[in-house]
Image: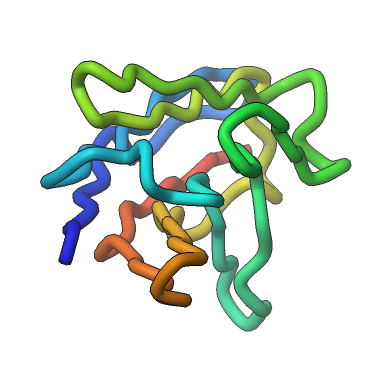
């Protein structure tokens, strides 16, 4: 089973930027959905941005125009560029990948993002 490892989280002031990386231990071609979720304290985990079925991209309304998801298939890595960060972006960011063929969802361990106001 492919493993996902996130990196790039940290503490940043409001208005700042961070770039998260999700490195997969194997090919990411087989995943129907791969992207980023986040969970703020006391809240449910929510979708931030994801590639859907290889071509489409979905963003949460709250991050449109500020966050950009990208991928490097040669490196089996998915990125999340986060600009104009707000305090409400604070949370643990998880990389997730769904493979429809085996109906399996894989999660990374998460990386903490803290935005100070």
Looking at the picture, how far across and down is residue 101, in whole percent?
45, 66
Given residues 89 and 100, the one toward you in this image is 100
Residue occupying the far right of the picture: 61
Given residues 16 and 76, the one toward you in this image is 76
Give the residue at x 76% y 35%. 63
Given residues 91 and 93, the one toward you in this image is 93
Q: Quadrant of residue 40?
A: bottom right
Looking at the picture, how far across and down is residue 34, in whole percent?
49, 47
State left or right for residue 50 relative to residue 77: right
Q: Is the N terminus in the top left, top right, bottom left or bottom right quadrant?
A: bottom left
Looking at the picture, how far across and down is residue 105, in whole percent?
42, 71
Residue occupying the far front of the picture: 101
Q: Is residue 63 above or below residue 44?
A: above
* Colouring mode (rainbow / by chain / secondary structure / one colour): rainbow
Give the residue at x 66% y 57%. 47
Given residues 56 and 15, the one toward you in this image is 56
Q: Is residue 41 above or below residue 91?
A: below
Q: Is residue 83 above or below residue 22?
A: above
Q: Quadrant of residue 12?
A: top left
Count of numbered circles in the view: 0
């Amino acid at each position: 089973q492919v493993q996902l490892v996130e990196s790039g989280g940290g503490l940043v002031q409001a208005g700042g930027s961070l770039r998260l990386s999700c490195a997969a231990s194997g090919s990411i071609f087989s995943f129907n959905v791969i992207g980023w979720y986040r969970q703020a304290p006391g809240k449910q985990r929510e979708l931030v941005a994801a590639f859907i079925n290889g071509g489409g991209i979905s963003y949460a309304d709250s991050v449109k125009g500020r966050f950009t998801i990208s991928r490097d298939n040669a490196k089996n890595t998915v990125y999340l560029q986060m600009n104009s960060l707000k305090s409400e972006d604070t949370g643990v960011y998880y990389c997730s990948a769904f493979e429809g063929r085996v109906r399996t969802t894989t999660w990374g361990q998460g990386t903490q993002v803290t935005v100070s106001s």
